[in-house]
Amino acid sequence: MRRRFRLGWAFAAVFAVVNGASGAPTGHPPTALVVGNDVFQPGAAYQTGPGWLGLLCDLSGCRLVPARLEVSPARPTGLYDDQPIAGQQLRFTLASKAPGRVLGWFHPDARLPWLVPGSVTTYVSAGDGVKRRSEGGTFDVTVPLPGGQMTIIAPLLDQQHGAIVLQLRTTTKRQLLRVLPTCSGEGLDRFLLWAGDIDRDGRPDYLLDFASQTGGEAVLYLSSAADASQPLVGPGAVFQGASSGAECDGGSAWLGN
């Protein structure tokens, strides 16, 4: 099937801003986020201990559950120009075994009273078996909301930069998010990990994965972190994934080459 993308406009002006806007907005404290398990991180920022929460999802829904982080020194090679990199290997375990998939690990912050153990309002998750919808030859993802409403996350083709940018849409507003990886082998529907209301303000939040084998980020977008320049959501937590050592061969599952 021929892949089709909706064409965005004014990308030349916004590409650098969208691709580089990785910080949390002023006035909304970021929280530590890790996506994946048994992952490597350069540096020495993490400490062994409890106090983490896993966003655990299954067919019945999602909840935040207590977890523990074990940190060990690591110096893998082949990640960046075959040079060993000093860092840490991060391994999480749940305080109590439970079925399901952990989509993200969070370190609570006293300034974020909603980040506590318990059930989390969820609309869509990668752990509930819901298939991503590809309608009309596009790869838009529809997130059903209460009251029959919905939001759409649409991949837009930036022809000038040869990139795919995600756009979040409601019936009245649109917001560009970030650039998706386009290396060959990347899935066409894996960017949405979770959507729900984690900050409990009655508006949708999103956990999106922009990572690839060459590195990248996962971002928790919060409706409570929106501002004038980001009318729907703002980044409340960002996880910078390390490269796996693989190289991008110039091909792209997204771009069909």
Image (spheres, rainbow, N blue to C red):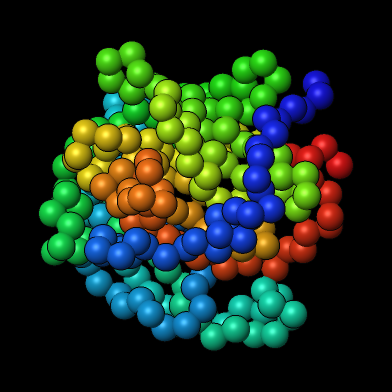
Q: In which quarter of the image is the C terminus?
A: top right
Q: Can residue 257 be seen in this view?
A: yes
Q: Which residue is drawn at 63% across and 28% down?
A: 139
Q: Nearer the viewer, residue 12 or 68?
A: 12
What count of labels does the image hold?
0
Q: In which quarter of the image is the N terminus?
A: top right
Q: Is residue 60 left or right of residue 186?
A: left
- Residue 210: x and y in percent read 56, 51
Q: Which of 138 and 34 is in front in this view?
A: 138
- Residue 143: x and y in percent read 43, 26
Above or below 30: residue 5 = above
- Residue 256: x and y in percent read 82, 37
Above or below 83: residue 184 = above
Q: In this view, does 155 lie to the left or right of 29?
A: right
Q: Which residue is drawn at 37% across and 62% down?
A: 24
Q: Residue at x 48, y 41 (%)?
A: 175
Q: Can residue 93 be seen in this view?
A: no
Q: Which of 105 and 170 is in front in this view?
A: 170
Q: Which residue is drawn at 78% across and 49% down?
A: 160
Above or below 49: residue 165 = above
* Quarter where residue 9 is shown: top right
Q: In this view, does 112 lie to the left or right of 127?
A: left
